[in-house]
Image (spheres, rainbow, N blue to C red):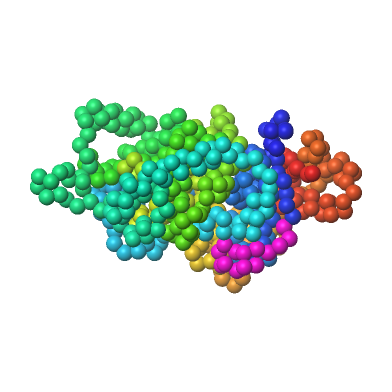
Amino acid sequence: MASWVALSSSVVEYFEGEDFYRCGYCKNESGSRSNGMWAHSMTVQDYQDLIDRGWRRSGKYVYKPVMNQTCCPQYTIRCRSLQFQPSKSHKKVLKKMLKFLAKGEISKGNCEDEPMEPTMEDVVAGDVALINKLDIQCDLRTLQESLESEEKKKGRSAKKAESNELIQSQHPEEKLGSGEPSHSVEVHTVPKPGKGADLSKPPCRKAKEIRKERKRLKLMQQNPAGELEGFQAHREPLFPPKAKSNQPKSLEDLIFESLPENASHKLEVRVVRSSPPSSQFKATMLESYQVYKRYQMVIHKHPPDKPTVSQFTRFLCSSPLEAENPPNGPDCGYGSFHQQYWLDGKIIAVGVIDILPHCVSSVYFYYDPDYSFLSLGVYSALREITFTRQLHEKTPQLSYYYMGFYIHSCPKMKYKGHYRPSDLLCPETYVWVPIEQCLSSLENSKYCRFNQDPEAVDEGRSKEPDRLQVFHKKAIMPYGVYKKQQKDPSEEAIVLQYASLVGQACSERMLLFRN
């Protein structure tokens, strides 16, 4: 539908929210309520303004909880990344990763600090039926069909090869696999003398490869900003300036601490554009999907036949955000991306993120369950905060890290409040309030107005609904003109509700599609 409009505009289709649905957080069968719209296309500025009014996307579906009625009020939370200082528990996770990379040490015990988001399908559980009914021309449909075909072929050819990996798996849950190539932690043992190579040590490299690596490291030292290489592969600086001895180590010091030449493992973080899908994204999508499938099976106890490729592409790959590359923006441009974590040449985790004019917005994160001992949920959040700070060097107005929704009433979702300093969005006036000022109120009531000024109002509210832009019968017109053509009395209530939720600025820029 967006192709009908010869403009770089957001085109949305709003659905009136009336029913209560199953909650993906507290599992109440009829406690969740939200308003939603299908975004056929959307500019990054419009989405920035929408999330600053409490909206959030899942694929191309953009939704806003009805805060004073839903069972688990969801407050938009952002971290002020430039002032962020890692806590003791954060430093513990970073040190654990460094020990694993340097020496192959695996921490014992469970990961109590590991956050666990509900599945993307659960978050918008009540809206999935509506989404599935829509006649959507998904941008990734061709990619999805080719992926399904490739998955079937690889599933057949991988069965023999994967049997050995299943035996070597660190976790017994691996046996729940469904014919996908395994992504396991291999338990290496030191061979007896004369019985082959020592698999606990990195393989020997040719002199030519070592020279190339040294050259690459030298270039990266000369470019500490860690610029994107053609935007597709992001490699952060390995040797940033060290903190002075009398100052605590910065987040960058802790993450990019140099490793010995004979390090046991190599971790590389790559940022690839997911929409429109880059060639690198297409080449790695099958492997990424298999990691997500194992994550859902082990962490969320999904059956082997779920999630399907269609669900994966719809919720985690498809995005309404238009790719934008202004000269004053980040080198990678704005839009939707996957931040891939490559360990020794294979994907072990993926962070789905949006890069917007003022922030990096975390959409979702999933990982190979065999690497749960690395607390990858915490580690990825720290990497995304670091990434936000790096983008800020080129784009000063981009300085916040949006973590999605903070749900005080859900213990598993309160971990987001540990990334300080952070702010919560007032659900009535849409101003940001430091989280410390909100917690006492949230202890007394699930729903709170954080703005303490009783006279304060929503400054961005819809004041002139007749200026709202409508896309009707392939023509763009202000609502003042459109309403004169309508006879349905319910139409005005729906349009005015939409205007009140998106605000005046977005209502004038975005095109509201009406049949």
Above/below status of 297 relative to 260 = below
Name the residue nearer the viewer: 438 or 483: 483
In which quarter of the view is residue 358 placed?
A: top right
Name the residue nearer the viewer: 357 or 67: 67
Relative placement, left or right, of 496 versus 156 is right
The image position of residue 160, as x and y in percent, is 33, 47
Q: Residue at x 59, y 42 (%)?
A: 319
Q: In the rendered image, which quarter contains the N terminus?
A: top right
Q: Residue at x 57, y 43 (%)?
A: 318
Q: In the rendered image, which quarter contains the C terminus?
A: top right
Task: Please state the extent of the stretch shown in magenta in the rendering.
Answer: 17-30
Q: Residue at x 72, y 46 (%)?
A: 13
| Residue found at the far left of this picture | 193
Above/below status of 440 relative to 270 = below
Q: Main secondary structure of the magenta part?
A: loop
Magenta stretch containing residue 165, yes or no?
no
The image position of residue 442, as x and y in percent, is 58, 68
